[in-house]
Amino acid sequence: MNLALIILAAGKGTRMNSDLPKVLHPIAGAPLLHHAMQTGAALSPARTIIVAGHGADQVRAAAHAYDEGAEVVMQEEQLGTGHAVDQARDALAGFSGDIAVLFGDTPFLQPETLERMIEARKTHDVIVLGFDLAELQPRYGRLVMDGSRLERIVEYKDATEEQRQIRFTNSGLLACDAETLFGLISDLSNDNASGEYYLTEVVELANQRGLTVTAIKCDEAETLGVDSRTDLANADAIFQTRARSAMLEDGVTLAAPDTVYVSFDTVVGRDALIEPNVVFGPDVTVESGATIRAFSHLEGCHVSRGAIVGPYARLRPGAELAENVRIGNFVEIKNAELARGAKVNHLSYIGDATVGEAANIGAGTITCNYDGVMKHHTDIGARAFIGSNTMLVAPVTIGDEAMTGSGSVITSDVEDGALALARAPQVEKPGMARKLFEMLKAKKARQSRGS
């Protein structure tokens, strides 16, 4: 199958009330555009064309972040969907195969539905995707059928009262041979209520030319578009519900499913336990049998089998936890690898570091990795014991089975098996505490009288 995708992403999205292009607003941590591209990518298209307009540079950057091979073309004027598709004509000059037209703000189309559209192309020249409205609404074009033949698509504002009662509704998605599609688009007219070139008119033109045209159905939820912040919130809620259900089906234990937030690419293995109020940002993999405890936040990280994270822990990008690692409450890990059985149980920051097997990091430990200009690395050896409230000033290496005394500020490497102490001697002055309090109280009394 030789397939090209045209994804329409030029709309400003006025109702979003935002400077950000509509297709870049996120659902589950990914732009709407990425969801559309992900659906299309399941069919391994030979070409992917993004039609951009408002915020084109941002749209281009987002498209290339998902697929470097995606091509972005411009729609300088917003003259309708037919005009938008026509902007891909030059980019697809000489292309021989099918074209599927998708919308960048329709995130829930399933790959299986797109596959059915392409399969239907074997027996029909033009395929339109439709759905049955649960409730009649004054917003969608209606599909006028004659048996299995799609006669025409009538925009609601141009429809008769009888046509407005039709429940079979246009999704806007279409599949057609490239040469045929662009030939039909060349004959589009803007003689309508909006003065725009409707892509929907290709159905009527195709019938006039004796081509075979039909419509296939999908679930209404697949066609949900995002036009406002309310739509965005509703779409995100739908995504979350589906993702949590899939996790449960895959054998993941969610103690309180409605409180867990996942991203579009979250991967959690079976028999993992996810406690309440956990947030998964983008690029997280949690292996089977791991436990993520309540109120933890993870992004850009990998958690191996048997590891326990949290509660109230934060894993940032580059956090790599091996099997049976323990990350406790109020611990933050960033760009660090923790080997098997390592423990960081309380109130610590480990960043730009390597922590060896079975090492124990005491409460309040901080890797001081940033000098104001550059980041530096800390290397902690296997079975090392880092005393509570240790400051490890990078770059620094702590050897295997070495130990640091509590409250130390370590600025030099510590060899294997050594004990490092780096703190000032304790000085005790008998009776000084009472004298100091008396002095402070007297000073406060004088200030009160003066006021």
Image: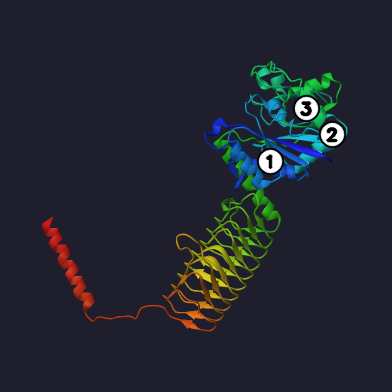
Instruction: Please identify the quarter of the rendering in which residue 33 is found.
Output: top right
Q: Is residue 177 visible?
A: no
Q: Helix or strand or loop: what does disc 2 sit on?
A: loop
Q: Are there few (<14), some (14-19), or many (20+) residues within 10 Å of tag 3?
A: some
How far apart, in angstroms, are the residues tagged by discs 3 and 2?
Answer: 16 Å
Please name the residue that numbered disc 2 is placed on: 121
Figure check: 164 above or below 280: above
Residue in the foreground of this view, choosing between 75 and 99: 75
Closer to viewer: mark 1 or mark 3: 3
Marks 1 and 3 sit apart, C-alpha to C-alpha, by 22 Å
- The circle drawn on residue 36 is 1
Pick the front one: 156 or 348 = 348
Image label count: 3
Where residue 284 appears, as percent x and y from the top left, is 62, 57
Q: Which colour scheme is used?
A: rainbow
- In the picture, the disc for residue 302 is none
Nearest to the eye among marks 3 and 2: give it.
3
For the N terminus, the quadrant is: top right
Question: Is 367 on the left-hand or right-hand side of 27?
Answer: left
Does residue 387 lie above or below 319 as drawn?
below
Amino acid of disc 3 = Phe
Vertical order, 201 against 384 (above or below): above
Q: Is residue 273 above or below residue 210?
A: below
Q: Would you identify the image quadrant in which residue 40 lies?
A: top right
| Pointer 1 or 3: first along the chain | 1
Q: What amino acid type should be assigned to the residue bearing mark 1?
A: Ala
Kindly identify which residue carries mark 3: 182
Q: Nearer the viewer, residue 338 or 311?
A: 338
Q: Earlier in the sequence, mark 3 or mark 2?
A: 2
